[in-house]
């Protein structure tokens, strides 16, 4: 996903679509000592389930479950020995200390931090209404679907536990940042992407 963003001239953040379970909006995978590890943000389920759909922008995080300290401990265990964890940890720590009410707000805050670390301009448009086939845009909404196999065949980079479990593709952008540091943007820019219309 970030390779597409890094190579785009501009992008539009989708906020008017219906929330879908099991997407990268609420889950990420990292490389732990035992292999691929899921970090899932718990969301509040609606009390009134008669409504069929709920918009992504209205999804609330379930903060009674103490997911933030658990996620941070998982990140520390996975990446403490990576070359750039200490370089970026102060940037990301607030995500796991300050509570967010809405999933979209948390994701925007996380995206802003990632952009700063990559030294990308954090300026974008947001959708005002949902359009199934937006005209004039390269629709990349499919990139948030965690169950769909990525069509992109991204180059390998060195990962902390690679000698133990081999290279694991399609992990969180944090894996690339903590392992590659300031050269992460160069890596993203150099990838050959298959653009899906």
Image (cartoon, rainbow, N blue to C red):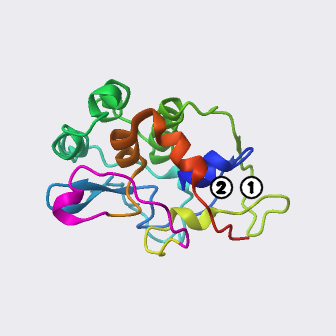
How far separated are the C-alphas under marks 2 and 1? 6 Å
- Estimate how packed mark 1 is, as few (under 14), some (14 to 19) or many (20 or more) residues with alpha carbons within 10 Å: few
- Residue linked to disc 2: 16
Whichever of labels 2 and 1 marks the residue nearer the N terminus, that label is 2
Q: What residue is at 73 percent from the left and 44 percent from the top?
A: 10
Residue 10, placed above or below residue 121 = below
Dividing the picture into quarters, in which one does residue 16 lie?
bottom right
Dividing the picture into quarters, in which one does residue 135 lie?
bottom right
Residue 125, placed above or below residue 129 = above
Residue range (magenta): 151-167
Q: What residue is at 47 percent from the left and 52 percent from the top?
A: 59
Camera-side residue of 35 and 142? 35
- SS at circle 1: loop
- Residue linked to disc 1: 129
As for residue 160 lying within the magenta part, the answer is yes
Camera-side residue of 70 and 149? 149
């Amino acid at each position: 996903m970030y390779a597409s963003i890094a190579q785009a001239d501009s992008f539009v953040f989708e906020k008017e679509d219906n929330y879908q379970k099991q997407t990268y909006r609420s889950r990420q995978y990292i490389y732990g000592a035992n292999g691929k590890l899921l970090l899932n943000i718990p969301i509040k389920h609606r009390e009134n389930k008669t409504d069929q759909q709920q918009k992504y922008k209205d999804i609330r995080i379930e903060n009674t479950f103490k997911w933030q300290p658990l996620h941070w401990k998982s990140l520390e265990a996975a990446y403490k020995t990576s070359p750039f964890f200490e370089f970026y940890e102060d940037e990301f720590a607030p995500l796991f200390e300050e509570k967010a009410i809405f999933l979209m707000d948390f994701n925007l805050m996380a995206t802003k931090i990632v952009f700063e670390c990559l030294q990308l301009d954090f300026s974008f448009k947001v959708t005002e209404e949902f359009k199934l086939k937006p005209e004039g845009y390269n629709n990349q909404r499919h990139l948030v679907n965690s169950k769909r196999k990525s069509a992109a065949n991204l180059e390998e980079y060195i990962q902390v536990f690679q000698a133990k479990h081999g290279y694991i593709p399609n992990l969180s952008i944090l894996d690339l940042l903590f392992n590659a540091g300031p050269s992460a943007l160069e890596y993203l820019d150099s990838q050959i992407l298959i653009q899906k219309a």
